[in-house]
Image (cartoon, helix red, strand yellow):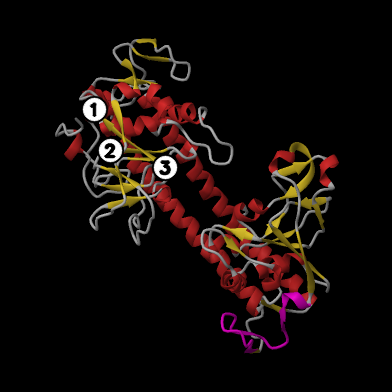
Amino acid sequence: MTTTKPYPAYKPSGIEWLGDVPAHWEVRRVKGCVTNIIDLTREHLDDELYLALEHVESWTGRVSSNAGDGVSFSGQVKRFKAKDVLFGKLRPYLAKVTCPKRSGVCVGEFLVLRPHDAHLSTFYLEQLLRSKPVIDAIDSSTFGAKMPRADWKFIGDLLFPLPPLAEQRAIVKHLDHADTRIRRYIDAKQKLIELLEEERQALISRAVTRGIDHNVRLRPSGVEWLGDVPAHWEVVQLGKIGAFSKGSGGTKNDEVPRGIPCIRYGDLYTTHKCFITQTRSYVSPTKASAYTPINRGDILFPASGETIEEIGKSAVNLMHTRVICGGDLIIFRPTIPMEPKFAGYALDCPAAQTQKSMMARGVTIMHIYSSQLKYLLFPLPPLAEQRAIVKHLDRATGDIDAAIARARRQVELLQEYRERLIADVVTGKLDVREAAEWRPEESESPTGDIEKRSEYIYAGAES
């Protein structure tokens, strides 16, 4: 068993973000070792990969299993070879960097980088470009506010640390071993989170469509995706028990550290529950009048989203303070007595989400309108029963929510550890040469290819 430790001697790199490097390492410019390949084509062969940005996982380089499925593109794409490094230049802070094992084509938002120096390992270059210090340095150079992009000229002029080739191989081997172990644990935790969320959703769905009395008499609801409901419940259209309005307001440029709480449509995408008890945004009182005021108990729907899942979201405002909302939100205000938390549970459950997904229109961006939402059907029990259901669900989901939160935090800590480990190793803060000698060969590379990297690394195939 070996441990990593700092190198015995260091020297200044002359680079602010890099600091000192091991005394025997070189410092080179990227363009002195790497070529930016621009091989444009309009063709895609059946056995080739097709990679868009969404096919590459941030910070890991894993390529999704559906990469290349149903390929349809217009215009030119870039050709790449196996073992080229693809760097996502759009929003580089997402760290979409990968090294495919198969040739193919990719969207123009990737830089196709190919080492032309025999002393630079492709796989070391991949790890280096995905490290946080390098990503931060590149991200600081981007241009464009809404769609920031990195420029090859800046990346090509970037100075980077270059250890001896044998040491690069040791670094890659050590990081592959660590990444495989971390990823297996993360995958297990994410599977646990999925199962817990499914259990939570099933509990909510059963309670808001059947109630909590297992002996209650049921009747057909007349709605296919709803099934049977308690005989004494109503099945109502949303538009008949309340009124809709559209949110309006300024932009995120209005935000201040403290002020009037403002709900934006992104809050509905990021919340893991169907309630809003606090906001991430605040607007100064002088600008708040340009926004739409909302009440406690108002239900908010996103008017647009990129996926069916996003357009199916909704949340009820449970804040007691003055609250406003921005644009691209639809506001529903009940005109009958209704328990707010019951509305939150009921309008975000699978039966309601199914209806909203069927109402959505659009391809790239999905849209939904109040003229459609007013026909949304959901079961409505008496007020006292709504409150009993809420009490039951709060208790039943509390432990599940706590378990999900713990699992998510564990995943975050592991991701932070992996990020820091890569940064420390590729910049020479830790010496892994001895540790790498004890590492077994992994059967799966971090990008998800069922091949041994040693097939390339130790056969000298980087050059």
Position of 303 relative to 88 (above/below): below
Q: Which residue is mark 3?
A: 109
User: Which residue is depicted at the point 36% across and 46% down?
Assistant: 62
Q: Which residue is mark 1?
A: 116
Callout 1: helix, strand or loop? loop
* Residue 350 vs residue 65, the one in the foreground: 65
The segment highlighted magenta reads 219-240
Task: Classify residue 419 as left or right of residue 207.
Answer: left
Question: Where is residue 155, by image quadrant?
Answer: top left
In the drawing, what numbered circle is on residue 84? 2
User: Which residue is depicted at the point 77% across and 62% down?
Assistant: 298
- Toward the left, the furthest residue is 459
Which amino acid, by three-letter code, is at mark 2? Asp
Which amino acid, by three-letter code, is at mark 1? His
Callout 2: helix, strand or loop? loop
Spatial distance from mark 1 to mark 3, Cα to Cα? 22 Å
Task: Classify residue 113 as left or right of residue 293.
Answer: left
The numbered mark, 1 or 3, whose residue comes first in the sequence reads: 3
In the rendered image, residue 220, in percent from the top left (x then y), is placed at: 62, 89
Spatial distance from mark 2 to mark 1, Cα to Cα? 11 Å
Quarter of the image with the N terminus in it = top left
Position of 56 relative to 347 (above/below): above
Disc 3 crowd, CA 10 A, few/some/many (<14, 14-19, 20+): some
Spatial distance from mark 3 to mark 2, Cα to Cα? 15 Å
Callout 3: helix, strand or loop? loop
Q: Are marks 3 and 2 in contact (CB under 8 Å)?
A: no
